[in-house]
Amino acid sequence: MPSPPVRPLVRPLDLADEATAAAVHRIGRASYAVEAALIGFDGIPALREDLQEMRDRPLRWLGAVSGGGEIAGFLAWAEEDGGGIGVDRLCVDPAWFRRGVASLLMRHLLAESFPERAVEVSTGAANAPAVALYEGLGFVRGEDFSPVPGLRMAHFTRPAPTGREEAS
């Protein structure tokens, strides 16, 4: 009986490293191309972002990295003025779809990196896999919005914990 596949490990990514930045850029474009098809809108800004524009963004990066060093997916965020965390992008290499990579990254961000802070994220409202992920992780969906004609986005918030939760 074959052994189950090994899940990637989450670690910070350094986009100053050329190979890392190139892999993140490639994965982002591939992942956003799939989202564009899902939501029927190909004007996602990250699809047109070149490597240097991506590297220049004031974001922090986490990657899901396989034992062989392959980046399976990544998450990038920024700290917001009110102390919350704004997830800017969550992308999975299509070769790693349906293996729990996005969930692994988000769970790490929520439980390990920022367990006491509010976290916000937006996705295309028609991106059913992403919507299901955020709802499954306890995010609350706010009002949808349209930043540009033809694009409807769903906004989600995971509020900061208000106090100690009792164990069930």
Image (cartoon, helix red, strand yellow):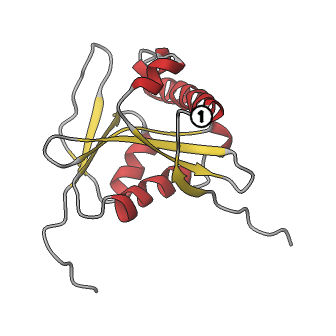
Q: Amino acid at mark 1?
A: Asp
Q: Secondary structure at mark 1?
A: loop
- In the rendering, at what x and y percent does residue 27 appear? 59, 32
Instruction: Determine whether, in the image, residue 148 is placed left or right of residue 52.
Output: left
Instruction: Give the quarter of the image for residue 39.
Output: top left
Q: Nearer the viewer, residue 45 or 126?
A: 45
Q: Nearer the viewer, residue 164 or 141?
A: 164
- Assign the C terminus to one quadrant of the image: bottom left
The residue lying at 15 percent from left, 40 percent from top is 81
The residue lying furthest to the bottom in this view is 168
Residue 44 visible, this orientation: no
The residue lying furthest to the front in this view is 16
On screen, residue 19 above or below 168: above
The residue lying at 18 percent from left, 37 percent from top is 143
- Assign the N terminus to one quadrant of the image: bottom right
- In the rendering, at what x and y percent does residue 140 appear? 23, 52
The residue lying at 68 percent from left, 53 percent from top is 66
Residue 123 visible, this orientation: yes
The residue lying at 36 percent from left, 41 percent from top is 77
- Residue holding disc 1: 17
Instruction: Determine whether, in the image, residue 78 is placed left or right of residue 6.
Output: left
Q: Nearer the viewer, residue 50 or 7?
A: 50
Q: Count the labels in the image.
A: 1
- In the rendering, at what x and y percent does residue 33 appear? 54, 24
Instruction: Give the quarter of the image for residue 107.
Output: bottom left
